[in-house]
Image (cartoon, grey):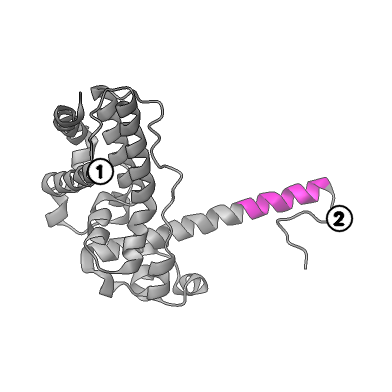
Amino acid sequence: MRNPCGKAGGTHGTEQSAANRGCGRRERLREQTDRKIMRAALEIVVSDGVGAVTIEEVARRSGVAKTTIYRRYRNADDLLHRIQVEAAGLPDFSDLDPSRDGLRAMLQRIQDCFDSELGLKAVGAVLTSDNDALTAIAEQVLAPAEQRFSAFVNRGIVTKAFRADVDLGFLFDTVLGSMLAYTALHDKATCAEPLSSSKMGANSTNGNADGAWAAHMAGLLWTVIAV
């Protein structure tokens, strides 16, 4: 059977172009649907716990039909294990100098990344869960962010802007813990209302809106790691 998204001998250019456009639209729709399912599942985890994640509840919150979800996942456990977090927005620090301003900009990008890719409240929920699937979800964003964080600090060590005895793993854990704690303490909606899918998008937390956490944390870290 000929793949409608691939090339086929004898197909006219215009027909092939139309087929490619059709495949592109279907792929975009599929990605949008997958994103809705992911966000709904994480919303349920944050508000009600892992045990509350069912295909029926995901369908209700996402607006995606149960039949569509079942075509992708066998059950709720399969859904949790196969959720993928988009990685395209992972922060790049290669343009930042290892200075206090560069440190603040890096921290802001980390916060923006977690907020847009996974949702800061969802990060906190999955990190405190003993569910292996949820831990894997967080690691999809955490591991690359930690690698780039370490690369930034190492550049500062090489240029002698930062101390050479910095414990990179502990430093990143401290940054992550501070970010999550700041978000929880400064977002009144955490206790006032359940997390909605729209709030898991970019700039969903009050703490992220003005860059206050990044500025305060940069000042604190600078006194610790600067030479």
Kind of residue indicated by mark 2:
Gly
Across and down, in percent, residue 116 comes to 34, 45
Q: Residue furthest front?
A: 165
Dot 1, how many residues are within 10 Å of its Cα: few (below 14), some (14-19), or many (20+)? some
Q: Relative to 87, is 38 above or below? A: below
What element does badge 2 sit on? loop
Left or right position of 179 against 86: left
What residue is shown with label 1?
A: 172
Q: Quadrant of the C terminus?
A: top left
Dot 2, how many residues are within 10 Å of its Cα: few (below 14), some (14-19), or many (20+)? few
Q: Relative to 162, is 111 above or below? A: below
How far apart in space, not on screen, are marks 1 and 2 (Cα)? Answer: 54 Å
Nearer the observer, 168 or 75: 168
Q: Residue furthest bottom?
A: 74
Instruction: Name the residue rendered at 31%, 27% in the picture.
Output: 156
- The magenta region covers 13-24
Kind of residue indicated by mark 1:
Phe
Instruction: Name the residue rendered at 30%, 25% in the picture.
Output: 98
Q: Main secondary structure of the magenta part?
A: helix
What residue is shown with label 2?
A: 9
Nearer the observer, 92 or 99: 99
Across and down, in percent, residue 154 comes to 33, 32
Instruction: Name the residue rendered at 19%, 44% in the picture.
Output: 174
Left or right position of 204 against 89: left
Across and down, in percent, residue 89 comes to 42, 42
Q: How many marks on residues?
A: 2
What element does badge 1 sit on? helix
